Every structure is written in structure tokens, then in C-alpha cells.
Amino acid sequence: MAAAKNATLRPGSVIAMTMLFSGVSQGFGRFSYALVIPSLIHTTLHSVALAGTLGSANVGAYLVGSITVTLISKYFRATTLIRLGLLLATSGIFTFALSDSFGVFFIAMALAGFGGALIWLPSPGIAAAAVETNKKAWAMGMTGAGIGVAITFAGQLSRYLTGLPGLWSWKALWLVEAGVAMIAVAAAFGPLQRINRLPSTPGPRPSATTPPLADGEPSGPSRHKVPGRTLLTAIYMVYGLVQGVFLTFVVTALEHDHHFSSGSASFVFATVGFFSIFGGILSGRISDRVRNRASVMGVAFLAMALACYAISDGALVMVIPGAIFYGLGVSGIPNLVGAHLGDHLPTHAFAGAFALVTLFFGIAQAVGPQLGGMLEVASGSFRLEYLLLAGVATIGAALSFALNFVGRGGTLP
């Protein structure tokens, strides 16, 4: 069904907005926190473990947000969830930028995390609904690319702000991000209102015995079977653990263990963000063409494993390629998971199903930063931590390749 029949916005405009929303949700509201951890420890927190606690507050609230989306997505439009999420996430970013108290930091990170879930979970489905069926994964990849754009922007901006004195070395970054988030809020309450109704069936058409559900009618994963959903959930949980720890501590690890300057560590972070712009798009396009989401996902996990090993080693000749590999790999997996769901679900069921899978992703992310901070305190280094992450990412690759056997004699549900 053509998008023009359901919206007055062009597909390109819809995708551009979902890129902006996802950038605020994840690139600013979560991942840019890694850039300010060293300055926060130096000026305010004075503890890696407390920094990990704040990271866990963010992803823990994201988990609660995922549960909320699972419960309410059948009753509210995706655009309504995004608007509410943007208001909460923007409030969190502003609050964090204007505070210097751990308690307020905690609340701000929780607001950003909860709001981020409300923004991110419906966004890929909206992007996929704006294009033809054979471009769904590409559209989801474009939405995820917004996260990479935001990470790149934040990483480069951080390099220029490192010379600012005291608290301003990190406050200025979050104030700029809050300003961009306000632009996203304006777009959500302005142009986004021109989406009148999402297409009801971008995925497989219902059978003759199963009438299509009306837009807004209660629905859920129980009405639609997704092969390999258990294995897919495990894959996304592994991904959440690797992603949550890697991006939270990569800047701190490079500065603390390998004596990178703040500018050089921020450059590595920006490199991850820059190449993540293309990773999601490429993986989506490739998987659309070859129709093998699982194998593309397995390759992405292997790229992440190599990146984790490179950070553990710390040599510049390995760290830069590692940042490239990580960027290309990390941005592909969410949209491939989403595309696997989208292959079997109509749009009105997508947000709830994606949120349900994301619950376990959120659990891993909530636990990861806290465990990472504690492991660093115990060992005095991030080297062991990143070696373990390499192993976990390799397990993710094995699980992804195993997804190929579901529906071909495999027995997993």
C-alpha cells in the first residue's frame, strides 16, 4: 500500500523525522553520556561505579519504558507515544545539563531513558510504513542511522569543548543537545501531525479466515506468529549487553587504560558514530536483497567482537579499525531484528512486538553498565571487561547464524 494514500508527508520526510527522533532518543539521551563520564568523574562523581549507576538508571528506565510500550501501544497511536517520549527525553537532557547533584542526575537519566523507549520503539515501524514492502529494512536502517549522526555530532562537538573549564567541559555538550531535542519536539507537534493514518498491512496480508484488524484495534504478538521469536529475543539480549557496556565505557577505557587524550578518545567515539550511519543502511539493504536477515546479523556480531578485542588491546592501529567495525556492526542489528518482526507482522502490531523483544534487551542493558563499573573497580582496568565482551559478541554471532535453521527443520518457536 503506497504511503501517499495514508499520509500527506512524503516518505523521505517521514524517514528524516524518524532519524531526528531516534538521534535524540539514543544518540543524545543515552550514548552521549559516554563522552562526559571522564569529566563527570573528575568534577562531580569521583567514582567509576557511580558513573555506571547513572548509566544503569538510564537503561533501567528504558526497560520500564519498553514494558510501558508493550502494555499501551495497542491503545495509543505511535505518533502519540513519540511526542510524549520526546517531551520526557528533552526534559531529562535539560535537567542533566543544569544539575551538579547525583540525585538529580539519576532522575534526569531515568527521564531520558524512559522517554527514549517511547520514541525509539515505534519509530522504525513508522519509517517502514512509509515505503514499499521491499524497502522496509532499508527504511528501518535509515531510522537507526539517525543515532549514528547524533553520536558523530556529539563526539565531534565534545572534542571542541574539552578545553572549557570545570563543569562546562560537559554541561555545554548537553545544553547543545537539549537545543536540538527542542527542534525534534517542534517537528513532532508540527509536521508529524500530517501523518493521518498508518498503513494497516505493510507485512504479510492476513489470510481469508483472519480478518485484518482496524487501525487502533487491540492487537499483539499473540495474534501473529513470528518464527524464532525465542531465539530472536536471546540474540537481542546479547546485543543489549555488548552495546550497553561498550559504548558506556569506551571513552573512559581509552583515556584510563591506554592514555588517549580526551580529544583522541572523543574522535574514536565519533568514528563509531559516523560509521554506524552507514552500517544500518547497508545491512538493511543487503538483507532486503538476499532475504537472509540472520546471516547478516551474524556478520555484524563478529564485527563487534573484533572491535571489543581492539579496545582491550588499545593500540591505535587496532582501535581505529575497531571503531569502524563496531560502528558498521552495531547499527545493523536493531533494524535487522525489527525487519525480522516486520516480515511477519502488520504495522499496528509492530510496536508492541518490538517492545516485547526489547524487554530482555533492556534487562541486559540495565545490568551491563553497573557490572562493567564494578568489574573495573575490582580489576583496576577495562581490559578484561572488553575481552569478555568480545566473547559475548561471538556468542551473539553463533545465535544469529542458528536463526537460519528456524523454519527449516528447526524446533525453536
Image (spheres, rainbow, N blue to C red):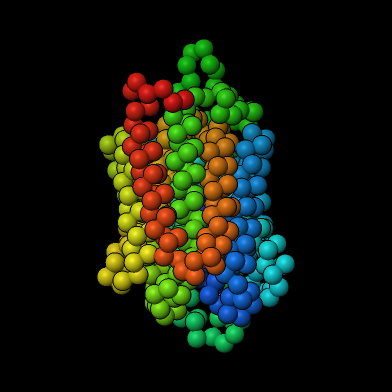
Q: Nearer the viewer, residue 259 or 5?
A: 259
**Residue 360 position in % (x across, y down):** 55, 42
Tag count: 0
Does 403 sit left or right of 177 as displayed? left
Place residue 66 in its image quadrant.
top right
Instruction: Tell me the residue at 64%/52% (across/down).
Output: 61
Instruction: Tell me the residue at 67%/67% (across/down).
Output: 105
Place residue 108 in its image quadrant.
bottom right
Q: Please identify the quadrant where the N terminus is shown.
A: top left
Query: Could one spot residue 10 in this view of the protein?
Result: no
Instruction: Tell me the residue at 62%/63% (across/down).
Output: 54
**On screen, 175 above or below 407?**
below
Q: Nearer the viewer, residue 169 or 203?
A: 169
**Residue 403 position in % (x across, y down):** 37, 33
Residue with the most extreme front position: 378
Instruction: Tell me the residue at 47%/43% (across/down).
Output: 236
Q: Nearer the viewer, residue 382 or 104?
A: 382
Does 149 sit left or right of 307 as displayed? right
**On screen, 124 above or below 309?**
above
**Residue 369 position in % (x across, y down):** 55, 59
Query: Could one spot residue 167 in this view of the protein?
Result: yes
**On screen, 290 above or below 148?**
above
Q: Nearer the viewer, residue 206 or 156?
A: 156
**Residue 188 position in % (x across, y down):** 59, 54
